[in-house]
Amino acid sequence: MARAYAVCRAIARREAKNFYYAFLALPRERRNAICAVYAFMRQADDLADDESLSRSQRRANLDRWLAAWHLAAGGSTTSDPVFLAVRDAIRRFSIPLHLLDELVDGVAMDLDHSASDAPDTYADFDGLYRYCYLVASVVGLVSIRIFGFSGDRAEKLAEETGIAFQLTNILRDVSEDAARNRVYLPLADLAAHGVALESLLHRAPAAPPTPAERALLAAIAARAEDYYRSAQALLPLIHRESRPALWVLVSIYHALLRRIQRAGYDVFSRRARVPTAQKIAILLVGLARMAWARLLG
C-alpha cells in the first residue's frame, strides 16, 4: 500500500498546481488519502480530455475505466496503484462510493454534450451550478470526510466552497475554454450584459476586455465572492489538525480570484496565476497553524 500511495503523491505533486500546497499541510494519513482521490480524478480527467480521440471514443474509454474501478472497489484484484490507494482511503475515511461516481459524472459532462460543431454552453446559472457541483463540490464533500468535520451545515458549506473554486477556475480559463469551443459563462448572463457568444468564441487574441465583458466577468466574480463566505464558515467545522490545509487551499484560490479582479478582469492577454512565492508564503502560515493545532492536542 505504501507504493500505491507514493504513486498518488507523485501524481499530485506533478499535476496539482494549487491543491498540492494545501495537501502538504495535512497529517500524513490524511495527505495520502487526499492525494489518492486527486490521482483518481486526474485519471478520469485525462481520459475525458484526450482530444486526439473522438468524444464517443473518450466516453467508451472512461466507461471501461469506471467499470474496472467498480470491480476493484468491490474487492476484485487490481494492479492499478491509484485504485488500490483509493480503495484503502474510502475504507479508512468512510467515503461513500457514490461520490466517486459523481466525480466521474462531472468530468464526463462535456463528453455528453452534442458532438456537433456547436459550442458547449450552459443556458443559465442553475445549469452551470450542476456542472460545478459535479466537478468541484463533490471534491469538497469527499475532502471533508478525509479532513474530519462536525456540524449539520458542513456538507452544504463544503458544496458551496467547491462552487467558489470552480467559478474562479472558469474566470481564469475563459480564453482557453473558448479556444476549445467551450463557454462556461451562462448564456443568460451573456445576454444580460450584452456580450454575444460569438464575440467570446472569436475575439482577437490578447485583446483587452470590453466594458461589457468586464461587467460580465465582474458579475461572475461577485457570485464567487458570495460562495467564499461559505468557505470561511466551513473552517471552524473542520477537524483542528486538518483546518490549516483547508485554510491554505481557500487562501490560494481566493488570491487567484483577487488577482483576476485587480487585473481588471483581463483574462485574455495572459493567464492569471498565483506566484509560487505567494503560495509558499501561504503554505508556511498553514504549516505553522498545523504545528499549533498539534500543540493544542
Image: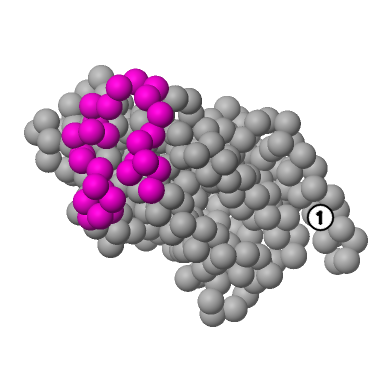
**Measured from the top left, where is residue 80 in percent x and y?**
45, 34
The residue that appears at 55% across and 71% down in the rendered structure is 154
Position of residue 181 in the picture relative to residue 115 (left or right): right
Q: Mark 1 is on which residue type?
A: Arg
Where 71 falls versus 94 (above or below)? above
Position of residue 156 in the picture relative to residue 175 (left or right): right
**Measured from the top left, where is residue 29 in percent x and y?**
68, 50
**Measured from the top left, where is residue 71 in percent x and y?**
34, 47
Q: Which residue reaches farthest front?
A: 211
Res. 190 in view: yes
* Magenta-colored stretch includes residue 205: yes
Q: Secondary structure at mark 1?
A: helix
The residue that appears at 48% across and 25% down in the rendered structure is 270
Quarter of the C terminus within the rendering: bottom right
Give the extent of the magenta segment.
188-215
- Quarter-wise, where is residue 67 in the image? top left
Instruction: Work out whether residue 185 or residue 137 is closer to the camera in this orientation and state it.
Output: 185
**Measured from the top left, where is residue 116 in percent x and y?**
9, 33
Position of residue 227 in the picture relative to residue 60 (left or right): right
Instruction: Work out whether residue 281 or residue 257 is closer to the camera in this orientation and state it.
Output: 257
Residue under label 1, please give it.
289
